[in-house]
Amino acid sequence: MSHSDDIDHCAAAIRAGSRSFDAASRLLPRRVREPALVLYAFCRLADDAVDLNESKAAAVARLRDRLDRVYAGRPRDVAEDRAFARVVEAFDMPRALPDALLDGLAWDAEGRCYRDLSELRAYSARVASTVGAMMCVLMRVRDRHALARACDLGVAMQLTNIARDVGEDAREGRLYLPLDWLAEAGIDPRAFLARPAMSPALGAVIRRLLRAADGLYVRSEAGVGALPPSCRPGILAARHIYAGIGAQLDRLGCDSVQHRARTTGAQKIGWLMRSALGAGVVSVLPRSPVIYARPLPEAAFLVDAAACPGTARDRADVLCAAFASVKRRDLQAQADLLGHHARPSSTA
């Protein structure tokens, strides 16, 4: 198959498997949209390979072998692998990013549960922030601050997905909600998995997760201005569409056991229009200081992997270094002054 045929295959896979991303990607310029479709198609293939396979550990091992072949320039003769190999070469994609994605899928294969929000964010960074960081690479953006905000957006989107799919996951024997939150709410994880049922306590836990996502959506917006102007509408669209899923779940009373939060085509069109307008506003506003917030600790390794060598350190680190330098000068001046007064006067 030709390169264009491979792109068409990936685009068709995304239309069938991720309508939210398909809608948002339509606002991206072609030079970014096509490799982004390839990236999402490869990630979707990897997720399905583990999710739909009885032998999940073996599926992860096969994916690692496929990734080895992609980076060696000898991809398997399937559209997703061939196209992804071209993207890896064209954009110099850091290997650590898709490797981290496979680590997250390996955690799924283990049936891992997460003790607290930090552990859940670590998982979300691997299965979602990796995609945000790789999207920055596709946009030729390697600035550390922009990457940190892209990782915020990835975690927010994954937390939304987890909140939406609580019932579906439980019926498959999976539980992603933080165990300490469940304990505080008086919910026994084993009993819930044995018989998933909605309750006010569970609704409160799901709502708490949505609020954690909302905070990260807000933080992520500060990074949009660091992206190429032509890419801003598409990224804002992804942010609004996924946040809209959370808002819909809120309207359902946070009941994702008996219901699945869905958004309509009309809503998506509204968010696309809002994102196009919002991108114009971003272009004329001064840069938000929120962009300088430190990366989530659980996602910092992705920022390090994707950032170009020599990019600016966190602003907080720069300010601390500056304050330390001023303090050293003040102490030295005081020492010189004390030394001057302590010297004995010379005798005639």
Image (cartoon, rainbow, N blue to C red):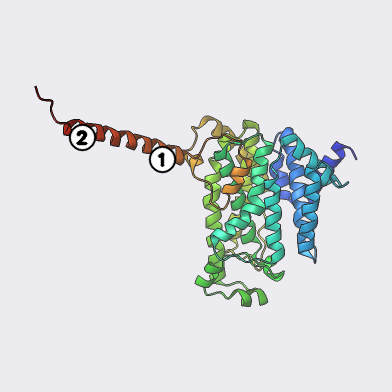
Q: Which residue is identified by label 1? A: 320
- Residue 212 in the image: above or below residue 147: below
The quadrant of the rendering that contains the N terminus is top right
Tally the numbered discs: 2
For this rendering, which residue is in front, 281 or 340?
340
Q: Please give the name of the residue rendered at 81% of the width and 50% of the height, measured from the top-left corner.
A: 66
Image coordinates of residue 37 in percent, x first then y, are 75, 43
Earlier-in-chain disc, 1 versus 2: 1
> Who is closer to the viewer here, 69 or 220?
69
User: What residue is rendered at 54% in x and 59% in y?
Assistant: 118
Q: Residue furthest front?
A: 348
Residue 159 lies in quadrant: bottom right
State the CA–CA distance, disc 1 to disc 2: 27 Å
Question: Which SS class for mark 2?
Answer: helix
Q: Which residue is mark 2?
A: 338
Residue 198, x across and y down, in percent: 61, 71
Reply above or below: 263 against 173.
Answer: above
Question: Where does the image place residue 277, in percent across and percent down from the top left?
Answer: 59, 36
From this viewpoint, which residue is outermost toward the left? 348
